[in-house]
Image: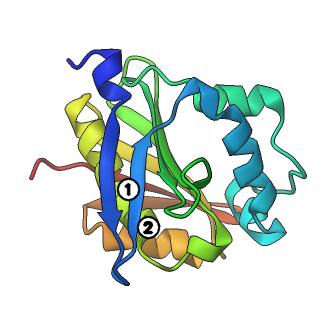
Amino acid sequence: MASQSEDNQEHGTLTLPEGIDVPVRTIQPDDVPALKRFHGRLSDKTIYLRFFGSMQELSDKKAKYFAHVDHVDHFELVALDPDEPDEITAVVRYDRESGSDRAEYAALIEDRWQGRGLGLHLTHQLIDEARDKGVRFLYALIMRQNRRMLNLLQALDLPEREHREDNARCIEVELQKE
């Protein structure tokens, strides 16, 4: 297993289909202010679709929770703005259920970066990390009207199961070894 300092290293750069290079790295504890600024740039619709309700600001407590990961059971990648490298433009994370090979998956992309392939590319990197840490299944509870997230999970082209809950769909994908 990699040491924590190895896990904190840059994950490199993603090149989006339009040719823009986006730096990617693991989340770090000192990212709390950047997470709060990131949340402040999200539209009400994006927040509603991700959190199933409104959230005017990201509290210090939640920001600290999201920024502190153990790199095994809780892992998060952030994409950084190529023009302002202190600003987060997207996050993807998993949180493993205690003692299992299943983890909850979440992704959140700043509005101006949505629809450009960033979420899909980050999710592929997250899946590689999850596989390396023994996660076999990722699941997400997604609002039915969140077409982008539903399309992203389908684009992974992995075996999936789904069940419906009220106004949401719970989708689980199996992380097969490549």
| Residue where numbered disc 1 is placed | 123
Residue at (12, 47) in percent of width and height: 177
Which x, y percent locates residue 63? 72, 33
* Residue 161 visible here: no
Q: Secondary structure at mark 2?
A: helix
Up the image or down, 86 lies above or below 159; here it is: above
Find residue 34 and report its image quarter.
Answer: top right
Q: Nearer the viewer, residue 149 or 31?
A: 31
Query: How many tags in the picture?
Result: 2
Q: Nearer the viewer, residue 35 or 150?
A: 35
Which x, y percent locates residue 65? 66, 26
Which x, y percent locates residue 23? 41, 54
Q: Residue furthest front?
A: 83
Find residue 81 and report its image quarter.
Answer: bottom right
Classify mark 1: residues with Cα within 10 Å, few (<14), some (14-19) or many (20+): many
| Residue where numbered disc 2 is placed | 118
Q: Nearer the viewer, residue 84 or 27?
A: 84
Classify mark 2: residues with Cα within 10 Å, few (<14), some (14-19) or many (20+): many
Identify which amino acid the numbered label 1 is placed on: Thr
Task: Specify which label sits upstream in the sequence, 1 or 2.
Answer: 2
Residue at (44, 61) in percent of width and height: 162
Is residue 101 left or right of 22 when viewed as pictured? left
Which x, y percent locates residue 5? 34, 19
* Residue 101 visible here: yes
Q: Residue furthest right?
A: 56
Up the image or down, 129 lies above or below 52; here it is: above
Residue at (39, 25) in percent of width and height: 71
Mark 1 and mark 2: Cα distance apart in space = 8 Å
Identify which amino acid the numbered label 2 is placed on: Leu
Residue at (20, 17) in percent of width and height: 1
